[in-house]
Image (spheres, helix red, strand yellow):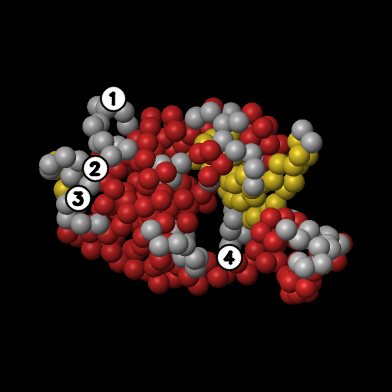
Amino acid sequence: MSEDLDVTETLETRVTAALNRPVEPEVRALAEMLAPVDALGVLFYGSNLRTGSLEGVLDFYVLTSGHQEEKIWPRVSYHEVPHSGSTLRAKVATMSLETFRAAASGELLDTTIWARFVQPSALAWERDPQAGADIAEAVARAAETAARLAVALGPDAGTPEDYWRALFRATYAAEFRVEKAGREDSILSTNREHFDGLLPLALMSQGIGFGRGAGSTIRPEMPKQQRSALAAWWKRRQRLGKPYNVLRLLKASTTFDGAARYAAWKIERHTGVPVVITPWRERHPVLAAPGVLWQVWRRRKGGRAA
């Protein structure tokens, strides 16, 4: 990973350019359609951003104006939109830009926002240039937060990849989710261009110096007091990470708009068994789940819909 810095580049210009990357016209049109009246912008992320594919589920974050209503956020919904004889599918997380910025800056207990948005994303729709600039500023804060913790968790000296690897290994372990071993290596290898040069820019933007060693090795110059404070900051979030994720899953089980349709699509995709969405299943996806799974298990051999 090359780390030759462009002296004219700043974290803000780097993030703005990354967010303005081109996306498929269908993605941009879908993002605009998904934006509610109070939306400031819609971020597009995930593997489909990298591949340009419209298959599977497209992942969006809708950022709104005003204050966050829910204490456990974001609000999640699933949408299916007919397109050229097929169907576009989207999973949408909605939250206020104010809360997104606070989470990205590390002011909240949440770890998912800055860990997610230090990775690639695109601004698929913005209300106006000022809204786009505000969103870029918030995403830049995510990069700063991630970089600070990467330095605190990483070695005294190492390559930027060493620090990012330490960061993602720690954040995945703190969340209530199952990832294959080496997930952090996959993130870095598939997004090599995105991370190339990002760590030094994120450190310099918050006044954290570093020395240069052989090759791309750096030695961050973080004061011991700041490193200790970051360790305490992370220890609390690490301890509460899994319980907080459980709360989100419990909330999503009752407030996920379109959960039944999303689950039906996932089941058919993985088993080949179509699931009929009845009005009762649409209203009570959690209660319906055991019966649906039992019917799918029984009917895989018969080839009938569950």
In this rendering, which labeled residue sits more in front, label 4 or label 3? Answer: 3
Residues tagged 4 and 1 counted as in contact (Cβ below 8 A) = no
Question: Which three-letter amino acid code belongs to the residue tagged 2?
Answer: Gly
| Residue 24 horizontal/vertical position (percent) | 60, 31
Disc number for residue 17? none
Provide the residue designation for mark 4: 248
Q: Disc 4, disc 3: CB below 8 Å?
A: no
Give the mark nearer the N terminus: 2 vs 4: 2
Q: Secondary structure at mark 4?
A: helix
- Disc nearer the start of the sequence (3/1): 1
Q: Residues within 10 Å of mark 4 (few under 14, many from 20)?
A: some
Residue pointed to by mark 2: 207
Which sits in the foreground, 167 or 2? 2
Q: CA distance from mark 2 to mark 4?
A: 35 Å
Q: Which callout, 4 or 1, points at the residue further toward the start of the chain?
A: 1
Q: CA distance from mark 4 to mark 1?
A: 41 Å
Frontmost of labels 2 and 4 is 4
254 vs 49, left or right, is right
Q: Does residue 37 lie above or below 243 as drawn? A: above
Dot 3 crowding, Cα within 10 Å, few <14, some 14–19, many 20+: some
Q: In the depicted view, which residue is nearer to us: 14 or 277?
A: 277
Can residue 116 be seen in the rendering of this structure?
Answer: yes
Q: In screen coordinates, is 259 left or right of 173?
A: right
Q: Around disc 2, counting alpha carbons within 10 Å, would you say few (fewer than 14), some (14 to 19), or many (20 or more)?
A: few
Tell me if 286 is positioned left or right of 177 in this view.
right
**What whole-number distance in Å separates the C-alpha atoms at marks 1 and 2?**
17 Å
